[in-house]
Image (spheres, rainbow, N blue to C red):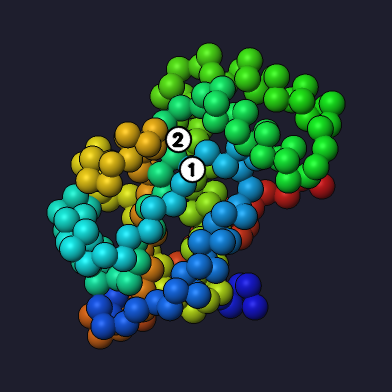
Amino acid sequence: MLLEKLHWRYATKKFDATKVVSEDKVDRILEAVRLAPTSSGLQPFELIVVSNADLREKMKPIASNQGQVVDGSHMVIFAAWDNYTEERINMMFDLVNEERGLVNEGWEAYRKFILSTYPPRDPEVNYQHAARQAYIGLGIGLTAAAFEQVDATPMEGFNPDQLDELLGLRARGLRSVAIMALGYREAAGDWLVDLKKVRRPSEQFITKLA
């Protein structure tokens, strides 16, 4: 079933602007992203979900005038932490202790290691690391959308500085990384919908060392 869904999905080029993805489907897709694995469990990114039509019109020129921004139902912006700080790291470690109801000696030693390693690094290095975690979430989100029979398009073709300004992300210590557009395909206007999915052959893509 998983492979069938992945064969079904594609980067939708034309959404049907008259169709809206139900909130329960959107919520399940977002929850799948929330459950995505991240390095050290720090979860260093957030999701900004834009369904407001006026705001999406403002986003369109920032995103190279791509039609999916306004024709899609929901735009999910993956926004990574701009830096790793002691406050952010401690927040996540404290949350783990609170949710699990215990303090583990090994876990606390690992906290000290992360605190001694991440905050002293260059902020750009930390942002790039956080952005890679956001891409893990993006992959999970695209897969979850396919399971919900919701079309999704991953998008990088936008000006991140302008999008950050529009959404006030920098004031929150966030930087936009990617957009996942959600909606339903309009086959009549989508040049890609009927074309064969093409990937490199497994023997060229996978190396098994037994």
Residue ID at (61%, 72%) = 3
Q: Which residue is mark 2?
A: 81
In terms of sequence position, does the residue under pointer 2 or pointer 1 come before the other?
1
Query: Residue type at mark 1?
Result: Phe
Residue ID at (73%, 49%) = 208
Residue ID at (32%, 82%) = 19
**Would residue 118 appear left or right of 9 to someone viewing this image?**
right
Which of 121 and 48 lies nearest the eye of the viewer?
A: 48
Q: Position of residue 80 (x, y in %)?
A: 44, 40
Query: Residue type at mark 2?
Result: Trp
Q: Position of residue 97 (x, y in %)?
A: 74, 37
Name the element at disc 2.
Answer: strand
Inspect this view and state whether residue 7 appears: no
**Image marks 2 and 1: residues in contact by CB distance under 8 Å:** yes
Q: Which residue is mark 1?
A: 45
* Above or below, comparing residue 62 to residue 110 in the picture: below
Quadrant in which the N terminus is drawn: bottom right
